[in-house]
């Protein structure tokens, strides 16, 4: 949720981390919100199967403010497949946290793989806070 909101060039920030000069970087962020929902393999963290093809990733190419951060994936025989328990982090931006949360959960529907699992309570406290 940090990188999609960062205005700075990520290479400059990473080089400053390596050089030990991060304190000299004026980090700037967009005035919006981001929420990430992790798509996992059912059974994670105990036991889960690997190697299931993942579909829907191309949807993100034309969608501004939506990101799929790979974690437990690999490229096999020309396609992206599951290769871990925490498979892909689906991150979405919004004008506020409530909108970002709704966008992130909507984007989880674009991605499919066998045994796909996700929590449905990520950012749930946002709903309660808005209703007060």
Image: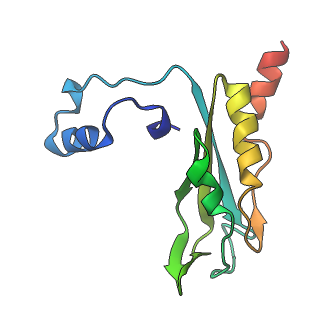
| Whole-percent x, y for residue 69 in the image | 53, 54
Residue 56 located left or right of residue 22: right
Q: Residue furthest front?
A: 62
At x 66% / y 67%, what residue is drawn?
45
In the figure, residue 79 lies in which quadrant? bottom right
* Relative depth, front residue between 31 and 58: 58
Residue 80 located left or right of residue 13: right
At x 43% / y 24%, what residue is drawn?
29
> What quarter of the picture does the C terminus occupy?
top right
Vertical relation: 118 (above or below) 106 = below
| Whole-percent x, y for residue 3 in the image | 44, 39
Which colour scheme appears in the figure? rainbow
Residue 123 in view of the camera: no
Vertical relation: 97 (above or below) 15 = above
At x 69% / y 76%, what residue is drawn?
47
In the figure, residue 110 lies in which quadrant? bottom right
Q: Residue furthest right?
A: 131
Residue 127 located left or right of residue 40: right
Vertical relation: 82 (above or below) 8 = below
| Whole-percent x, y for residue 94 in the image | 64, 29
At x 49% / y 38%, what residue is drawn?
4
Vertical relation: 91 (above or below) 57 = above
| Whole-percent x, y for residue 124 in the image | 78, 34
Count of picture labels: 0
Q: Residue furthest bottom?
A: 77
In the figure, residue 9 lies in which quadrant? top left
Residue 106 in view of the camera: yes
């Amino acid at each position: 949720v940090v990188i999609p909101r960062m205005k700075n060039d990520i290479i400059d920030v990473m080089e400053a981390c390596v050089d030990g000069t991060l304190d000299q970087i004026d980090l700037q962020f967009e005035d919006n919100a981001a929420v990430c929902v992790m798509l996992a393999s059912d059974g994670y963290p105990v036991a889960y199967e690997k190697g299931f093809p993942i579909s829907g990733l191309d949807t993100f190419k034309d969608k501004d403010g939506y990101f799929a951060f790979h974690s437990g994936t690999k490229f096999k025989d020309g396609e992206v497949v599951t290769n871990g328990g925490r498979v892909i982090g689906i991150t979405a931006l919004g004008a506020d946290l409530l909108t970002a949360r709704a966008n992130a959960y909507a984007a989880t529907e674009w991605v499919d793989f066998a045994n796909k699992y996700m929590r449905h309570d990520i950012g749930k406290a946002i709903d309660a806070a808005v209703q007060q």
